[in-house]
Amino acid sequence: MRQVTLPWLQGLFNKILKNPLFRRVILNSGYLFSATGISAALSMFQSMLAGKLLGVAGFGILGTITTFTSVINRLLSFRMGELVIKYVGQYSQTGDNQRAAAVFKAAALAEMAASILAFGLVCLLAPWGARVFTESPALTGAFTLYGLIILANLISESSTGLLQIYDRFRPVAVLNVFQSALTLGIIAAVYLLGGDLTGVLVAYLSGKVFAAGGLSIMAFQEASRQWGSNWWRTPLGILRPQTRELAHFAVSTNLSGTLSLINKDSDLLWLQFFRPSSEVGLFKAALAVTNLVQLPVSPLPQATYPEISREVASKNWGNVRYILRQGSLIAGGFTIAATIVLTLFGRPVLQFLYSPEFLPAYPALLILLAGFLLANTFYWNRTALLALGRPDFPTKVNLLLALMKTAGILLLVPRFGHLASAALLAGSYLIGVTVSVFKANQIMSQQEQMINRGVEV
């Protein structure tokens, strides 16, 4: 049996990795996956300890506070990492290092300004958030405390984008592991000492401060390595001819991210508004377990985006399709297997990770798995459109989904609670991913046809 099986597996492995570009995607994904796997395991322990320490209702309040800050941060975020990957990569590909440095400098300054503004907004809205979402004004300080994470991540998006475009995935992965370990260590201490919600928030904040500082230092070192120690003096005026294009990309990704808050990232807040904190805790637990399915897939968009951006800039459409196809085969195959396992053993997993009082989260878990199955398989749906120069299309899709989902939330969540939240989230993935994949394929087909007809594109 061994003589038959091993050559078959080796042949399959060699076939998948025969393209050097995809080998690089897998290598970089491997670094991130190793870190993601370790970090996810550590994060799951964090979640377990926090859930046991705070109980279902307290766990729901924790999720509300973290989501509140995340929503405001993403509301003002221009996703500068994506802009850096596309344009620093594009200018580096053509040897225009001065413009590449200017793009990174402009992105970092814009992200810094947006982060400061977002933190100010958190401080301003913290009393309202505590009163409306938790019905406890005494938690205003907790909302403000966790908001410091925004200042900690002052230029983290730009820094991450720069490190990815130059294939510095390994140090980023190591940094993420240390962040998770630090956070777990503090939460464990809080748990053993019988701490409370504030202690858990301090643990999360400490880990983020450590990781964000490390990212910034590594990014500046990489910038100096690529463009010289005086790169930061590069005048932004050289980007004047590209100002409109850069602004369009940044605004489109910001609007897309803002609308995505309704579609994918604000469910805990809506649920907390309409239903008891215990249901928020159940939904948060279901999401945490579902994220196990995303574990090996989550690094792929980060590793794929720089590669397809470079290939699109070079008009190597065969390579683009190959990377996307092989990525979908790997991601889809794993997700199907993981979905089957969690369908069969979801209840004992919930009971083991949390406690028997979290078992009612199982139906929501099954609903979420349906949406994540498609989203994982075509994980590249959004990044492909960014690389193809269509950052506006995800914005249009998210606008349509936001209108549909808001109507669904107002009609269904007050009555059906966390099950409706799970169904609406899964539905937004199913619709959004399908439409985006169709559009990306349409654009690539059009470009290929123009090349075949000898038309310059």
Image (cartoon, rainbow, N blue to C red):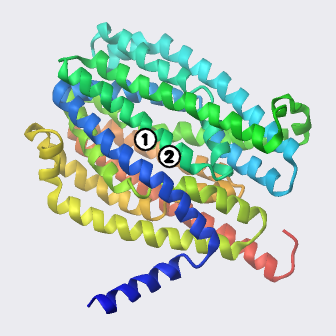
Callout 2: SS: helix
Q: Quadrant of residue 226?
A: top right
Q: Which mark is residue 177?
A: 1
Depth check: give the residue in front, 36 or 73.
Answer: 36
Residue farthest to the left? 356
Residue at (45%, 25%) from the top-left corner? 69
Asked if residue 7 lies left or right of residue 103, the reply is left
Category of crowding for the residue at label 2, using alpha-carbon neighbours closer than 10 angstroms: few (below 14), some (14–19), many (at least 20): many
**Position of residue 88 measured from the top left corner of the image (x, y, whole percent):** 76, 47
| 61 to 377, vertically: above or below | above
Tell which of 338 and 436 is nearer to you.
338
Q: Describe the element under mark 1 as helix, strand or loop.
A: helix
The residue that appears at 43% across and 36% down in the rendered structure is 178
Of all residues, the one furthest to the front in this rendering is: 3
Which is more toward the observer, 301 or 5? 5
* Residue 171 locus on image (x, y percent): 55, 44
Mark 1 residue crowding within 10 angstroms, few (<14) / some (14–19) / many (20+): many
User: Up-down: is 82 above or below 182?
Assistant: below
Q: Kindly give the residue lying farthest to the top in the view shown.
A: 138
Would you name the residue on which mark 2 appears?
173
Residue 403 vs 317, above or below: the answer is above
- Say which residue appears at 49% left-offset and 12% top-offset: 123
Q: Residue at x 37, y 35 (%)?
A: 181
- Horizontally, residue 133 falls left or right of residue 57, namely right
Q: Is residue 251 left or right of residue 364?
A: right
Which amino acid is tagged 1? Val
Disc 2 and disc 1 in contact, CB within 8 angstroms? yes
Query: Which quadrant of the figure contains the C terminus?
Result: bottom right
Q: Position of residue 318 (x, y in %)?
A: 68, 77
